């Protein structure tokens, strides 16, 4: 926790220059992984609605970052403010409507596939809610 707080204090957000997205968040993501796993096990995995929401958001996140990483274009000669510039829109204008439509279609297909897969694969039995001992009926 102290390391994460130090990183947040030392690494001031000023946006990316010459690359897509903001890469210092990767360290924080690695630091928070144990907590995220615990959250998945204790909350997200309990219901299909939560698992579908998680899968959808994960696919959209990967799709947005893949869009920027694969295109790998940053506008030159412009002073970009990370608070006022949303790069996916600039990238979509740069590659044109046809390729942008392909990216959107692939992203939607991936979201639909993740939803179908999530609904067809129920949570692990170990992730189910524990049964209260007082509610158990013992048959002798």
Image (cartoon, rainbow, N blue to C red):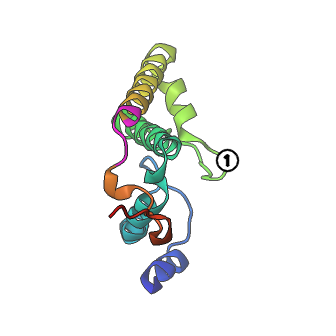
Along the horizontal axis of the image, is 140 left or right of 50?
Answer: left
- Label 1 crowd bin: few (<14), some (14–19), many (20+), radius 10 Å: few
Residue 83 in picture, x, y percent from top left: 65, 53
Most foreground residue, 86 or 45: 45
Residue 15 in picture, x, y percent from top left: 54, 57
Q: Secondary structure at mark 1?
A: loop
In this rendering, does residue 132 appear at all? Answer: yes
Most foreground residue, 94 or 140: 140
Residue drawn at point x = 48 percent, y = 17 percent = 101
Q: What is the residue that sits farthest to the right in this orientation?
A: 84
Along the horizontal axis of the image, is 89 left or right of 121?
Answer: right
Residue 110 vs 118, above or below: the answer is: above
What are the residue bounds of the magenta stretch?
118-123
Q: What is the residue that sits farthest to the top in this orientation?
A: 98
According to the picture, the residue beneath numbered tag 1 turns out to be 84
Most foreground residue, 106 or 88: 106
In this rendering, does residue 17 appear at all? Answer: no
Give residue 67's quadrant in the image. top left
Residue drawn at point x = 36 percent, y = 66 percent = 30
Residue drawn at point x = 43 percent, y = 41 percent = 55
Residue 95 vs 42, above or below: the answer is: above
Residue 37 vs 83, above or below: the answer is: below
Task: Inspect the magenta stretch and tell me whether residue 82 lies in it.
Answer: no
Residue drawn at point x = 53 percent, y = 41 percent = 49
Residue 140 in picture, x, y percent from top left: 32, 64
Residue 31 in picture, x, y percent from top left: 38, 71
Q: What is the residue that sits farthest to the front in this orientation?
A: 140
- The mark total stands at 1
């Amino acid at each position: 926790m102290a390391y994460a707080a130090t990183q947040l204090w030392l690494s001031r957000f000023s946006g990316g220059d010459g690359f897509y997205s903001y890469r210092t968040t990767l360290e924080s993501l690695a630091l928070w992984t144990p907590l995220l796993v615990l959250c998945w096990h204790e909350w997200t995995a309990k219901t299909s609605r939560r698992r579908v929401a998680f899968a959808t958001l994960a696919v959209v996140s990967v799709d947005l970052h893949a869009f920027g990483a694969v295109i790998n274009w940053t506008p030159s000669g412009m002073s970009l403010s990370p608070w006022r510039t949303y790069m996916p829109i600039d990238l979509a204008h740069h590659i044109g409507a046809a390729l942008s439509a392909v990216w959107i279609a692939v992203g939607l297909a991936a979201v639909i596939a993740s939803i179908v897969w999530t609904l067809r694969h129920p949570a692990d039995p170990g992730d189910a809610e524990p049964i209260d001992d007082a509610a158990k009926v013992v048959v002798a």
